[in-house]
Amino acid sequence: MNRDEAQKCIEISTRKLAAGDVQGAVKFATKAASLHDSPEVQALLKKIAATPAGASSGTTSSASTSSSANSTTQRPAVNREHTQPKREYTAEQEVLVKRVRKCNHTAFYEILAVKKESTDSEIKKAYRKLALQLHPDKNGAPGADEAFKMVSRAFQILSDEGKREQFDRYGADPDSRQAAPSGFSQQSYGRGGMQGQGNMFGDELNADDLFNMFFGGGGMGGQGGFGAGSPFVSFGGPGVRMHQFGGQANRQQRRAGGQGQATPANWMQLLPLIILFGFSVLSSLFSSGESFFSGSSPSYSFQRESPYISPRYTPNHKIPYWVDPAQVASVSAQNLAQLDKKAEHSYIRNLRDNCEYEYQDRERRMNDAYGFFSVDKQAYNAAKNMKLNHCETLKKYGYRT
């Protein structure tokens, strides 16, 4: 989705540049880079940077006939306009962004700054506060968009009873197969036995969708937000949970409306929720994975901790992992062999996820080193020479990265 939007921004920027609107070209090229950076975007930015300042569409026919001295005095002002894509932000906003981005991508409690025993209402309150502070429309600090997505991802997991329970038990992203790569460390692989089904909506429920659903689709102002009394829906787990936000004003609206008959427009507004409910019912039927169809599978851990004290090794790479002796006592040799394969697959999958995240992080840092007219060589070289530890481990096991 971001790639398509970025392509549209590139096309708009190209048209504006051809029309002489350099400022507009810079605006949409910058937006394209934030949505999905690519060599095409970088080439466009370099082309814009090389465009003479006098090519701006703000130059009128009368200005073209003015004296050369007058045009010379105007040119620095135009240049200043072109170097204003950087948005203003406060020191507090920058500190908050850095705090969130320092967190491991699957340290969901740390990202939301809540305790593991926090209640659902405390988690919702933390998300509401952070989402408003980090939303890109409000926070112009570098990396605010990524921090906003991390907060949204953390809330998606911790607000879902089933996924939260799975995360607390295994220490890994329950949607790691479908979700964006998760940057968790070797120690946080946690316990295995994950079903890895993820939610059925995949990437369709992005950070902006979640924000709009949570705040009623009203954006950063207007009639949206909590006052509108819009429902928030959380998916997965045992089904759909709906929470109605909005207090006195919303109740007064319902009383004033009486027992009015539902209009077609109201039904159209409810249709997305009905569809989501249907998907969630199907999701709950399949979310139990192997335990639903073929019996429960013993859980395991890549760390030795009670009750996982009996060591086993994966078949190909001899990766150690631990199981609960009581769980595997009655398991057949054939099923234990399948468990060994499953543990190895889970370990390698987590390595791949982390390796991909390391590549993306390095690429992002290298891109951040590029300004519009200059390059921070020190930052670029530091990013280029970053160690990709998970990728190196994959190579050690014979996998291409």
Image (spheres, rainbow, N blue to C red):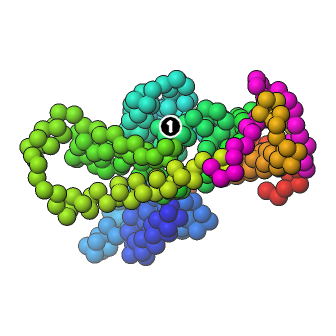
Between 379 and 123, the one nearer to me in the picture: 123
- Residue 282 lies in the magenta stretch: no
The residue at which mark 1 appears reads as: 161
Residue kind at label 1, given as amino acid type:
Glu
Magenta-highlighted residues? 292-319
State whether residue 187 appears in this view. yes
Magenta stretch secondary structure, dominant: loop
Q: Is residue 106 left or right of residue 273?
A: right
Inspect this view and state whether residue 34 appears: no
Q: Position of residue 24 (x, y in %)?
A: 39, 64
Residue 237, image x and y in percent?
51, 44
Q: Quadrant of the C terminus?
A: bottom right
**Helix, strand or loop status at disc 1:** helix
How many numbered badges does the structure rendering display? 1
Coordinates of residue 285 in the picture (x, y in percent) = 54, 52
Q: Residue at x 31, y 60 (%)?
A: 271
The answer to which quarter of the image holds residue 54 is bottom left
Residue, far front? 330
Residue 29 vs 321, above or below: the answer is below
In the image, residue 275 above or below residue 299: below
Q: Is residue 161 left or right of residue 246?
A: right
- Near mark 1 (Cα within 10 A), the count class, few <14, some 14-19 or many ≥20, is some
Q: Residue at x 87, y 32 (%)?
A: 311
Q: Residue at x 34, y 39 (%)?
A: 243
Q: Is residue 303 magenta?
A: yes
